[in-house]
Image (spheres, coloured by chain):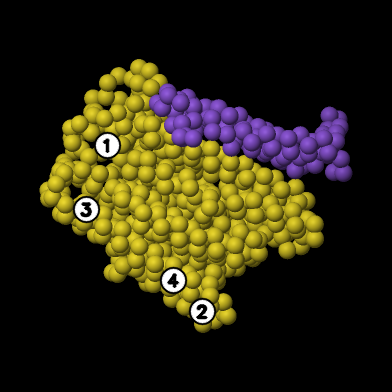
Amino acid sequence: MSPWLQHLPVLPILIPLAAAAIILLFAESQRTLPLVIAFGSSLGQLLAATTLLYFTTDAVPHVWAEGIGTYTIGGWRAPFGIVLVVDRLSALMLVLNALLALPVLVYSIARSDRLGVYYHPLLQLLLMGLNGAFLTGDVFNLFVFFEILLAASYALLLHGAGTQRVRTALHFIVINLCASFAFLIGVAMIYSILGTLNMADMAARWPSLQNGDRGIADAGAAILAIAFLVKAASWPLNFWLPGAYTAALPSVTAVFSITTKVGVYAILRLGSLLEYSVAPLGGTWLFYGAIATMVFGIAGILASRQLQRVAAFNVILSSGTMLAAIGLAPGTMIAPALFYLLGSVLASGALFMLTGMTERMRTMTPETANSPSAQPVTYSAFRVGEPPDPHPPDAEVGVAIPSAMAFLGLAFVGCALLVTGMPPLAGFVGKLALLSGAFATLSRSGDTFRAWLLIGVLLAGGFAGLLAMSRIGMRLFWSVTGRATPRLRVIEAGPVAFLILLCIGLTAAAGPVMKYVDSAAQLLSDPQAYIRAVLADAPEGAP
Amino acid sequence: MEIVYALVIGVLVASGTWLLLRARTFQVLMGLSLLSYAVNLFIFAAGRLMIDRPPIIGADGTADPARFADPVPQSLVLTAIVIGFATTALSLVVLLALRGLSGTDHVDGQESDT
């Protein structure tokens, strides 16, 4: 590998960090150059992520042995130094993140980035936190990247201000701070026993722990898992989610649809390394908690009247589905769960952005447009003397698309098919793979009850989603009164169309994608490969 | 020493949890601060409590592998303090914004009916 190419794994962290720092130097009134930088950063992340994905495939076996790449920061070898690890799962998550970020960025130019200050730097920092969490090879850096993404998400949730947002943001911050404390306690407990923070090193030493030590380490891992479950929105740790995801701006929630999956990723990563031996990182506890999460999500979907709320509960449902799959049978269910994750994140991103446009069908009457909640209050609340914006948020900029209603209807149907898992789109393929995985577990092991439970709840979830979506669709599109045709700009409609087309592409290319997620799952089922790759040239007898 | 240390952490966690469950935003914030102190002390203790031992290398420039304080938890605490401090400052701003917008210091932005 060329000397420059070996620095590739660190790029998904450095690019957004540098972009955020540079954008901060510009005044808010300047628009073009910061936007160009934000775009360049997102494209660069996509490029770096796809290249990493390519390197982890079997196509280029000479680059990284066994498809796992490591990057030692500052040249300090693991387990002493900080190490970044790229395996197939992290590369997949990086690509997914970059694919979601690009349309969100385009969408937010239309309206949301001018409702407050520092939108673009915060978005880039959020992406940095996400990328870092997917790449890091040690638990404490996982904490640091979690905090980076959380700090950015606090500010993004507050973006646009308004009483509703500030109130839910306060709840969101308090819950996540408590989760961070749990995270730190877990890390400290594990460190006090194992004397290491490197995940591969931890996994290598875990089996050799004796009675009392094993108990403390297990308790530490369990507390860590609680912190992950709060982020993954597992019941009963998810009451913060519906409020926060309903209050935030649509462009912000669209990118939030991947932040819950970081929790799922962390559980999958640590769980697979510890071979699902620790209570809530796998097995029965995780499974029943996840089933409860799914039931909670279904109940929420049925009870919601607002599209954005349905989308929020759908995030909970999809998190629950993934966790239940991991809990049921990690061997057979991880590959279907990863495929489901791809379709689900892209679809809920599209759905959240769509809610921003369908809301305008009903609410953009002159009187509500001037209501306090629709206006940015940041400046007035903090008395910041910012010069008046030459482009007020509600001004019509950009090119409008023709036949807006037809587009909205089509996009709505597309999103509904995707999130409910109806044929013929990617949601269906993911759900079908999950179901066939569950049936395979059914025939192989004696644990028929849990497999049937998952199958039942999964089908009920699809049905509830269909019911709620058709109810909302009828009210949105078929009611004659109180409806205005919104003016949709290309930069708003385009991203939604892009994400839906991406999902269609995912359906068409289901074969190769499935093959890749299969190989990713295979790699996860062999923690020794990960340990070998990370600790490849570590000296013997490390303390 | 360990028992006093453990008691201090216990008292901090207990008071922090009690305050966290209150309905007033300022009390919640104080609870979070107390909890973060407790967590920081806990991380520090993960490296074992010891007195008069240098972190790896002593003043005379020699290292005794049998007698040194683990420097890793100390650096972890430093990171945790910085992050906790920043987040607390942010929640203080949010607290004031909520107070300004809703006119009450209840965590839900409105007084409960009871």
Q: Check disc 1 and report its element: helix, strand or loop.
A: loop
Residue that badge 1 annotates = A111
Q: Distance between the residues labelled 1 and 3?
A: 25 Å
Nearer to me, B7 or A128: B7
| Chain B representation colour | purple
Within 10 Å of disc 1 (Cα), the crowding (few <14, some 14-19, many 20+) is many
**Circle nearer the N terminus (4, 3):** 4
Residue that badge 4 annotates = A456
Asked whether the residues under the numbered discs 4 and 3 touch, taking CB atoms below 8 Å apart as contact, a structural biologist would say no
- Residue at 18%, 32% (x, y): give it: A366
Residue A15 visible in the picture: no
Q: Distance between the residues labelled 4 and 3?
A: 29 Å
Mark number displayed over residue A442: 2
**Circle nearer the N terminus (4, 2):** 2
Mark number displayed over residue A176: none
Residue that badge 3 annotates = A475
Residue A266 percent across, percent down from the top left: 55, 54
Task: Supply the letter of whichever chain is yellow.
Answer: A
